[in-house]
Amino acid sequence: MYTQGVAISGRLRLYDLLPDSTNPSADIAEIVAQYANDPSGIFSSSDGTANYAGVCWSDELAAATDDGKYTDLLERVADMFGPTLSAGPLDPDIRVEDFFFAATMLGRAYLSSGDSKHIDLLAEFLLGADTLQENGLWWHCKASPFFWGRGNAFAAIGFAEALTYIPEDHPAREELLHTHLLHLEGLAKRQDESGMWNQVIDMPETYLEFSATAMIGYSIARGLREGWLDEEWRGVADKAWSGISQRISEKGELEHVCVGTGPLPTLDEYVKRPYTDGLDDRGGAMALWFAVEIARLEAGV
């Protein structure tokens, strides 16, 4: 799943940031060997885009080991998002999770292969997403027109991943950036004094949710580091980091990570959706990405 994939990617990024630490590449290669050695057997017919994004570490492990089998795996999995929107697995109900799953895989495949089919499919999908509302927030999907916290975080991180890989001269880039900025402005207006965002973004009475804050914070830190966000956004990112860092124990235990959630039929079900405290793949993986991104931003690298 993407949760484990982001964690593996984060571990590789951490080593890249701290090259004097222990190189994790050999251990990671052993963990993922079954996927890299038999890519045709990774997924079952019931798997979908959240599973495909679970190999988002492929290009980074390829770079770390100089082994082309990982880029072959990346290309194979990226092809599963196509060949067209109508024929592929991306939900026509515009589930915001897919923004991230598609962007992190198709963007990496484009960077690795140079094949524009990947980035063009991604751009077509994101340009066609029509559930951003006038308040600057995304619905979870058309069937669930509610402003779920992690749903909006998936949208933010999805656009940030897309903008990381879409070339400056791509005809879709300007519009995608405009949409992303509208969304981030909507989010910034609703950031809690603690730096956190709520389980339902526009309902401050709902609990402060960890994973959404980590993902939104990462998206802003990435935009600052890559240069498509102005320095005025630095305060929002720093505040988000302050919020989640205070909610991570010395043992890696987290506070208030919303459990896995498909589309829900009522707003009340999002409000009452339970959370976990303690160790959590989903929150921990995204916090690691955010931590490394903030550290890179601080170091200017």
Image (tube, helix red, strand yellow):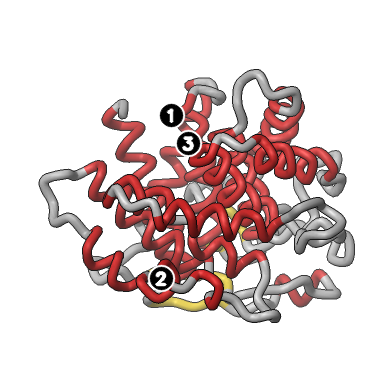
Residue 30, image quadrant:
bottom left
User: Which residue is denoted by mark 1 in the rendering?
Assistant: 225
Looking at marks 3 and 2 on the same chain, the residue that comes earlier in the sequence is marked by 2
Quadrant in which the C terminus appears: top left
Give the residue type at disc 3.
Arg
Label 1, secondary structure: give it: helix
Is 94 displayed left or right of 250 in the figure?
right
Q: CA distance from mark 3 to mark 1?
A: 5 Å
Mark 3 neighbour density, 10 Å: few (under 14) some (14–19) many (20 or more):
many
Q: Is residue 258 visible?
A: yes
Q: Position of residue 85 (x, y in %)?
A: 82, 52
Q: Give the residue at the far left of this rendering.
A: 20
Is 72 displayed left or right of 251 in the figure?
right
The image shows residue 136, relative to residue 67, as above or below, that is above
Residue 115, image quadrant:
top right
Numbered label attached to residue 222:
3
Mark 1 neighbour density, 10 Å: few (under 14) some (14–19) many (20 or more):
some
User: Which residue is denoted by mark 2 in the rendering?
Assistant: 37
The image shows residue 293, relative to residue 148, as above or below, that is above
Q: CA distance from mark 3 to mark 2?
A: 32 Å
